[in-house]
Image: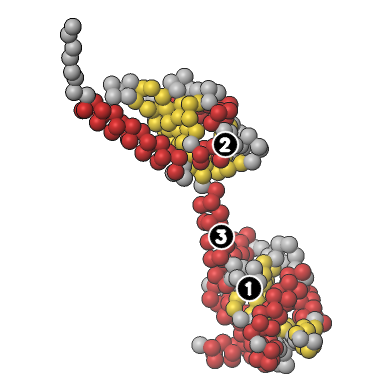
């Protein structure tokens, strides 16, 4: 009878280390926010992590063994058409996809998700390719956040109208088309006449509500192509694009009349308000944004000086406006 003893301590330790490494990798795959899909060398699905399961609407059990194109329907974000060679590129071990952008993943339930995609071959210790790992990054939340930041940067929080900065940007574009294409545009500067009375006697909540109601009232009287902005406090700006002089006067008068007919009620107390409006028709003589805003502001100031609740049109031969300009300078 013969026997032998073999010390397997080192082997056991190695097995435990491999098991621990595998567990860490598995936990990591199941915890990360990226969608991970692993494929065999012939392009069949082997594994989906939980994020991939949520994103694709496929369960690992139902997806396992299916060709990638069965569960991955990706189209171009701009064209809306399926990218014909995408699966072939994913499985091409010689040319890994570092980052493919502007894609839409069409999920099994018909919904669409904006994604970025990357793919790398999986190799064993000998360097042989044993599969492919595909990673999808859901960028829809990033897009929403960026859109929200962009909206906040260009819009007034209280009324939802564009703010002064965005208004001046659009006005600058209108100035260029007026100069280069001889288009007729007009700019209105509106200042509520009795806002301070409401704000001081009823509080800021009443003042904010008045601003909101007036902004809705004014916007309803404008064309779809017109731009309205809250410039600050109780002041509004309106850009009337492709609007002849006589028509711009009618629109301005219509806005004035609408506010004059409006009655604001707060805690059963009625308030009558008005609006003073400055009007300027864009012409080649106005070379800068500052000149236009200064002129239309001066016209609005004169409308207030002359008794409020009226429209004052800026004209180059207006001596009163010339004096006002001098005072401002």
Q: Residue drawn 44% across and 43% down? A: 31
Vertical position of residue 209 compared to residue 227: above or below: below
Q: Residue drawn 73% across and 77% down? A: 214
Q: CA distance from mark 3 to mark 2?
A: 26 Å
Depth check: give the residue in front, 113 or 15: 15
Q: Which residue is mark 2?
A: 56
**Mark 2, mark 1: which one is toward the viewer?**
2
Q: Which residue is mark 3?
A: 148
**What quarter of the picture does the N terminus occupy?**
top left
Of the image marks 2 and 1, the number of the one nearer the N terminus: 2
Across and down, in percent, residue 193 comes to 70, 87
Vertical position of residue 189 compared to residue 37: above or below: below
Vertical position of residue 128 compared to residue 28: above or below: above
Q: Residue drawn 63% across and 34% down? A: 108
Q: How many marks?
A: 3
Q: Residue drawn 48% across and 36% down? A: 49
Q: Residues within 10 Å of mark 1 (few under 14, many from 20)?
A: few
Q: Residues within 10 Å of mark 3 (few under 14, many from 20)?
A: few
SS class, disc 2: helix
Depth check: give the residue in front, 108 or 97: 108
Instruction: Work out which residue is located at the far front of the displayed protein and give it.
Output: 1
Horizontally, residue 297 falls left or right of residue 310, namely: left
Q: Which residue is mark 1?
A: 158
Across and down, in percent, residue 211 comes to 68, 78
SS class, disc 1: loop
């Amino acid at each position: 009878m013969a026997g032998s003893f073999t010390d397997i301590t080192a082997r056991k330790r190695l097995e435990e280390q491999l098991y621990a490494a595998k567990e860490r990798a598995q936990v990591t795959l199941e915890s990360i926010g990226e969608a991970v899909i692993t494929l065999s060398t012939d392009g069949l699905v082997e594994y989906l992590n939980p994020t991939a399961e949520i994103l694709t609407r496929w369960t690992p059990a139902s997806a396992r063994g299916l060709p990638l194109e069965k569960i991955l329907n990706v189209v171009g974000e701009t064209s809306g058409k399926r990218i014909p060679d995408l699966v072939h590129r994913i499985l091409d071990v010689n040319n890994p996809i570092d980052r493919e952008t502007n894609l839409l993943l069409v999920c099994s339930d018909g919904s669409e998700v904006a994604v970025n995609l990357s793919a790398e071959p999986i190799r064993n210790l000998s360097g042989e390719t044993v599969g492919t790992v595909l990673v999808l990054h859901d960028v829809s939340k990033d897009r929403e956040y960026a859109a929200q930041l962009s909206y906040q940067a260009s819009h007034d929080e209280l009324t939802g109208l564009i703010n002064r900065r965005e208004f001046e940007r659009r006005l600058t574009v209108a100035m260029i088309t007026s100069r280069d294409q001889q288009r007729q545009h007009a700019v209105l500067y509106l200042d509520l006449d009795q806002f301070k009375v409401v704000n001081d006697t009823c509080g800021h909540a009443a003042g904010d509500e008045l601003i909101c109601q007036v902004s809705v009232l004014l916007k309803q009287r404008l064309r779809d192509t017109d731009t309205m902005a809250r410039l600050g406090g109780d002041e509004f700006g309106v850009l009337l694009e492709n609007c002849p002089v006589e028509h711009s006067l009618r629109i301005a008068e219509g806005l004035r009349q609408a506010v004059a007919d409006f009655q604001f009620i707060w805690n059963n107390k009625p308030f009558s308000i008005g609006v003073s409006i400055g009007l300027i028709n864009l012409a080649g003589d106005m070379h800068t944004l500052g000149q236009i805003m200064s002129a239309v502001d001066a016209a609005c100031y004169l409308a207030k000086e002359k008794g409020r609740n009226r429209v004052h049109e800026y004209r180059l031969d207006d001596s009163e406006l010339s004096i006002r300009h001098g005072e401002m300078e």
